[in-house]
Image (cartoon, rainbow, N blue to C red):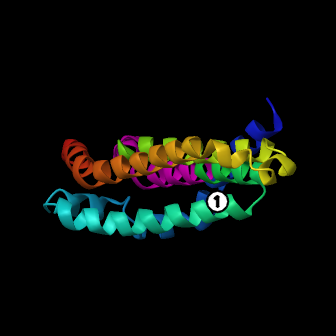
Amino acid sequence: MEKEQWTILLAFLAGCILTNLFGKDLLTTYGVLNEYFLSQYSYHAVDGNRLLCHIFAERGRAAFTIFLLGRVMPEKLFSILVKSVAAASCGFLLAVSVVNLGIKGIVICICALLPQWLFYFAVLFYYANCVRERGYQSVGEFYRGVASQRMPDHLMRGAVLVFGMILGILMEAYVNPVLLGFVVQLF
């Protein structure tokens, strides 16, 4: 394995270990992955339009912050940081779900992330790879105007990123509540 893959694996393990440092009482009392929240979730109807506005604001802020970080951070560091934070978050979330709900917590956790996070992760990793490719251009090449000749390429990449985010937001607002409600009723 190369260094980047080891870093990502260590980040995932760090997320799992961090969960265990919080203590079981804190993890089972607060948050959305506890029995009380899930029992209440099955009794409420989700208004997709209101949820869409909330998600759009939340994901928009996060996407803008990630975009800015991709512009100011060194390219390789940004790429590794994005992948490591995603891995640590997944490790933390999976460990919390197991601590709170046991094995069924993994199923509920995965259903809570699907299908929207397929789009979000694809957009995030695609952007990280675009930033990393930008780092391979020489500075002189960029300032001589060669990069400006590839403007349609940049517009296409931007359109793919925006389209992927919009699809993820729509999935989170309209598809995920139905899927999660179905899975919560099974348990």
| Number of numbered markers | 1
Percent of width and height locating residue 106: 42, 43
Is 25 colored magenta in this rendering?
A: no
Percent of width and height locating residue 97: 44, 51
Of residues 123 and 87, the one nearer the viewer is: 123
Q: Residue at x 27, y 48 (%)?
A: 176
Percent of width and height locating residue 31: 40, 67
Q: Is residue 118 left or right of residue 144?
A: left
- Whether residue 8 appears in this view of the structure is yes
Q: Residue at x 40, y 42 (%)?
A: 110
Q: Is residue 77 left or right of residue 67?
A: right
Q: Residue furthest top?
A: 1
Percent of width and height locating residue 167: 34, 47
Q: Is residue 37 left or right of residue 98?
A: left
Image quarter hosting the N terminus = top right
Q: Which residue is mark 1?
A: 18
Q: Is residue 57 above or below residue 148?
A: below
Q: Secondary structure at mark 1?
A: helix
Range of magenta residues: 87-111
Image quarter hosting the C terminus = top left
Q: Residue at x 65, y 42 (%)?
A: 129
Of residues 86 and 52, the one nearer the viewer is: 52
Q: Amino acid at mark 1?
A: Leu
Q: Main secondary structure of the magenta part?
A: helix
Is 99 colored magenta in this rendering?
A: yes
Q: Residue at x 43, y 41 (%)?
A: 118
- Whether residue 112 appears in this view of the structure is no
Within 10 Å of the Cα at label 1, are there few (<14), some (14-19), or many (20+) other Cα atoms? some
